Image (cartoon, coloured by chain):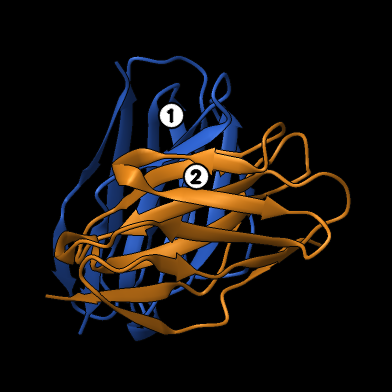
Chain colours: A orange, B blue
Amino acid sequence: AQSVAQPEDQVNVAEGNPLTVKCTYSVSGNPYLFWYVQYPNRGLQFLLKYITGDNLVKGSYGFEAEFNKSQTSFHLKKPSALVSDSALYFCAVRDMDTGRRALTFGSGTRLQVQP
Amino acid sequence: SQTIHQWPATLVQPVGSPLSLECTVEGTSNPNLYWYRQAAGRGLQLLFYSVGIGQISSEVPQNLSASRPQDRQFILSSKKLLLSDSGFYLCAWRDRAKNIQYFGAGTRLSVL
């Protein structure tokens, strides 16, 4: 079965500094990987995905993620953090079951950007 | 464009009462639909998924059930709520062309 690990409960960064939110995965076969963001009491918003192709994936709001097959990682990055980026971030991997196609989520990382 | 609606946004129910949460999707047909629960503001657990009308798969044994009476309608139900049913419930649909799941705004359920 597939799994996702987000080793950091919280990441603190100053506004204007680069940010990284870490994610590692475990799947059999080629992974389909996703990042979502959740603001308080809201649903999850899709940020970006990796299916195949370039290892650097660009997404919404200036976020990007780097797929590293040898390290089984898919870290989320942004060159310059904004206070408004403060939220809960989830990494996810898609099910290989051809019918189910559900997502398995990491435990989430809270990003706090200080002004 | 496609949209997903979930209601109610917030619900407070006594233990032992019934539950019905509704989710509808617009702008697409025959989507895969999902119910997730998020406990304590963190991890999401898949509860049910559906690949078509009347086709429901349950992921975990629990006090809840799901139904899909129409192509774009997904309902989460319970006959008698337990305290442990409290949580944030999220509905999602899968865009097959884009390989992306999109989520509704969620329902916060408090069982007292």
* Front one among B70 and A68: A68
- x, y percentage for residue B99? 58, 30
| Res. A40 mark | none
Three-letter code for the amino acid on which mark 1 is drawn: Pro
At 20% from the left and 85% from the top, the residue drawn is B112
- x, y percentage for residue B73? 37, 30
At 57% from the left and 18% from the top, the residue drawn is B97
Q: Is residue B109 left or right of residue B57?
A: left
Chain of the residue under label 2 = B
Residue sitting at the far right: A28
- Quarter of the figure with residue B52: top right
| Res. B69 mark | 1
Tag 1's secondary structure?
A: strand
* Residue under pointer 2: B34
Q: Residue A85, relative to residue B73: is it above or below?
A: below
Q: Residues within 10 Å of mark 2 (few under 14, many from 20)?
A: many
* Front one among A73 and B99: A73
* Front one among B108 and A22: A22
- Quarter of the figure with residue B58: bottom right
- x, y percentage for residue B81? 34, 73
Question: How many numbered marks are there?
Answer: 2
Q: Residues within 10 Å of mark 1 (few under 14, many from 20)?
A: few
Three-letter code for the amino acid on which mark 2 is drawn: Tyr
At 67% from the left and 35% from the top, the residue drawn is A54
Chain of the residue under label 1 = B
